[in-house]
Amino acid sequence: MIDYHLHLWPHGHSAAPMSVDEIGSYCEKANRAGIAEIALTEHIYRFKQTKKILGDFFLRYPESKMRSLMFEYWHQHCGADMDEYFSVVQAAKDAGLPVIAGLEVDYYPGEMDKVASLMAGYPLDVALGSVHWIDDWPFDHISDPFVMEYWNHYGIEKAWGAYTTALEELAQSGVIDVLAHPDLIKVAGHFPSVPDEFFDRMAQTAASSGIAAEVSSAGIRKPVGEAYPAPDLLSKFFELGVPITTASDSHGIDHVGFRVGEIKEFITSAGYDRLLGFKERRPYEVEI
Ligand SMILES: [Zn+2]
Ligand SMILES: [Zn+2]
């Protein structure tokens, strides 16, 4: 197994200095859970280099309490140095640790060319692609009552539609290798009347873009209480020949390898007998 979605820094905290020892402890914990290789995939918005190219991204939306909240979030999170991040991961590789260098890349409508040129300057092994917000609404901030209350205002069907459209545009941008937590829009436990319509679109876009989908145990820790993707969506990925990675989306060491046994069972019962690994953004097959 692999854990191809890991963060070093919890949300709401500034980026702490990184070390090879810290990465080593992630690898050790993963190894004890039967995981052969990990990918560090820090949020691209954590880095000052991203802030430099995207500026005050959220100021493009009309003034509102939501916009102020995201403006603050953006500023709170953008202090780390991407050069340092990649050089510490390289040092961990040089020390023989089973780690690859990744990024978790959000969808920035109209700005993906800039994001792609930033990424091209770094020795990246894998790029995850994520939709974490609809315009300036961070619909997955489940601990913020104001953000969660907005579900009532926006509406479930409309939210699933907007999320899926953003996911399609991100998949087709050519900038990413793997769709992270593909049905993240279910995080708070809100489902549309016919989820299959959206699942069909999510599976189709992964298949037609030639990218992989992530199977993540993170959803089990969230109000929705199940892995991403939902079983029906995983079946659709399998039917369309979409390859998969596996992940915990741990933000710190605590959840490294979280419920990896359950994920193994989940993917094998859906029919998968291979995962996809990445080196320098080139995919190759890995044994489960
Ligand atoms: Zn994410
Ligand atoms: Zn993540």
Image: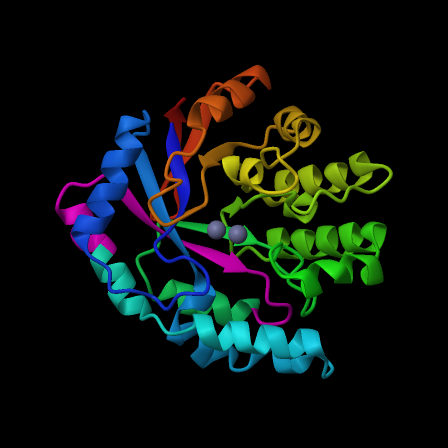
Q: Quadrant of residue 257?
A: top left
- At a point 79% along the width and 52% down the height, the residue shown is 161
- At a point 32% along the width and 67% down the height, the residue shown is 82
Horizontal and vertical percent position of residue 57: 58, 77
- At a point 45% along the width and 60% down the height, the residue shown is 11
- Name the foreground residue: 87 vs 154: 154
Please check the rendered image and state whether residue 109 is part of the magenta-colored stretch, yes or no. yes
Magenta segment boundaries in residue numbering: 89-111
- Residue 22 vertical position relative to residue 259 in the rendered view, above or below: below
Left or right of 198 in this view: 173 = left
Quarter placement of the N terminus: top left
Question: Is residue 134 visible in the rendered structure shown here?
Answer: no
Q: Quadrant of residue 274?
A: top left
Question: Is residue 5 visible in the rendered structure shown here?
Answer: yes
Please check the rendered image and state whether residue 42 is part of the magenta-colored stretch, yes or no. no
Horizontal and vertical percent position of residue 164: 72, 50
Left or right of 63 in this view: 152 = right
Horizontal and vertical percent position of residue 71: 57, 78
Quarter placement of the C terminus: top left
Left or right of 118 in this view: 36 = left
- At a point 55% along the width and 82% down the height, the residue shown is 56
Horizontal and vertical percent position of residue 9: 37, 58
